[in-house]
Image (tube, rainbow, N blue to C red):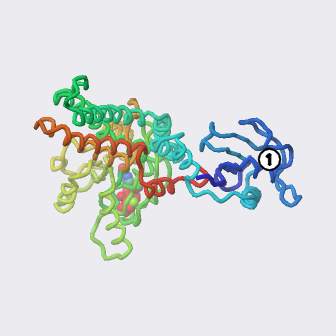
Amino acid sequence: MNENICAISTALGVGAISIVRASGPEVIMIANEIFEGKDLTQVPSHTIHYGYIVENKEKIDEVLVSVMRAPKTFTMEDVVEINCHGGIATTHRVLEALLLHGCRMAEPGEFSKKGFLNGRIDLTEAEGINDLIASETEEARKYAMNLVGGNLKAIIQKSRDVLVSLDAELEVNFDFPEEADNPEITHDKLKTALLHIKEDLEKLIASSKEGKLLKNGIDIAILGKPNVGKSSILNHLLDEKKAIVTDIAGTTRDIVEGTTTLSGIKINLLDTAGLRETEDIVEKIGVDKSKDIVTKADLVLYVLNNNEEIDDKELEYIHSLKNVQKILFINKNDLESKIDKSVLNRDEVAEGNTLTPNGLDQLKERIVSLFHLNEIKGKNYNFLSNARQTALAKKAYASIESAITSVEEFMPFEMIAVDIKNAFDELGEIIGVTYKEELLDELFSKFCLGK
Ligand SMILES: Nc1nc2c(ncn2[C@@H]2O[C@H](COP(=O)(O)OP(=O)(O)OP(=O)(O)O)[C@@H](O)[C@H]2O)c(=O)[nH]1
Ligand SMILES: [Mg+2]
């Protein structure tokens, strides 16, 4: 923990400025050894200084160095940030100079890990920082900022505090039941408190889907027979000629991906190879991929041709898509209608064409309303943000349920206390009050280098 670490914190490439960051007890001294301008060990905290990075009397770069002393820093240790000129050679030489003078290369996410271990941020805030960096849309950014601001932590902390005090009351009662001035704890009082927590957790767990949606977006697979206009629809929705469109059936052979946004939320569109029996090896692999993608998609946009009849096999396939939301888009409504719509579920049908074009704006609105995108946006963003948090919240929920059952069956307080302790440990793991070293390594290793 007390080591001096350094890394390049900005994206490596050609740019005006790069930032090389160092954290640890001796980083100001180390930076001072390679800095020409003034004595950095004597400057006040949170100040920035002009000078040169010098190695073996050679001026490597003209820089600005920020000096921030513990504890009011991201890691709660002394931190130095060297703003050097961008570009690969310069940035690497500045980094190298720090390494030569006693810093070691930071692991990915190690600055954040130090911030967590030193108590500046909890695990949900650390995860929020990572989400913020990865945000591609405005909604994902707002959502991540809510995490960074500690709002999810506060909710978890609140339930956990109630459990801690319930447990303390139970302990007193079963350790010294005869003491007259013990606070009175009854099965009724316990039940009321536990039901409140259960309700709060229920809301959080139910909202994890919305969190996933804000963060990762919606995966929409565009499926259907060859030549129905899947790629044309993709191109229209993206407003870009992303996929090749021809009148040859079997034009698309691999998944073509594109992203756009609807109501500020990311939409991942996956155009696929048209579904048909084929002897062509390449096309067959494509068709298999199209079928596989259904398991990953949040929505299947199944495209049909208005000018073609639906055969039994296709109908059977459409009906087999049971466990995924779908929109059946009848394309080419500029052509004569030969399709029998009565065999389709009316609630799932939409129609239009990509020529005039028609029905595509309505299709977008349909997606917005299907996933309640406008409502999600208006909410408070207090959603669980990843599988780790959701799994722990579900465990805590199960422990609370078990405690409630025990209360209802008038079990002894000692038994109820076991479930309560489990629940607050599980909630504690979400925010990192308790953690396993392997979990931290795994979690922070997914962070960027230099963060
Ligand atoms: N009349 C009409 N033609 C369309 C419409 N949409 C697409 N087409 C035409 O239909 C043909 C096939 O379009 P694509 O978008 O390549 O169809 P696809 O479903 O991706 O086909 P595969 O990649 O072979 O599976 C092209 O000639 C398009 O110009 C439409 O709404 N109306
Ligand atoms: Mg295509």
Q: Could you tell me which residue is drawn at 46 percent across and 49 percent down?
A: 259
Q: Is residue 196 above or below residue 141?
A: above
Q: Which residue is at the front of the view, 334 or 90?
A: 90
Q: Which residue is at the front of the view, 394 or 216?
A: 394
Q: Quadrant of ligand 2?
A: bottom left
Q: Could you tell me which residue is drawn at 60 percent across and 44 percent down?
A: 75
Instruction: Residue under label 1, please give it.
Output: 63
Left or right of 223? Residue 101 is right
Residue 55 in the image, given as x and y percentages of width and height: 83, 58
Q: Is mark 1 within 8 Å of ligand 2?
A: no
Q: Is residue 438 above or below residue 171?
A: below
Farthest residue to the top: give it. 181
- Which kind of residue does numbered mark 1 sit on? Val
Left or right of 115? Residue 47 is right
Residue 103 in the image, given as x and y percentages of width and height: 69, 57
* Residue 50 visible in the shown view: yes
Q: Which residue is at the front of the view, 34 or 250?
A: 34
Residue 443 in the image, given as x and y percentages of width and height: 46, 53
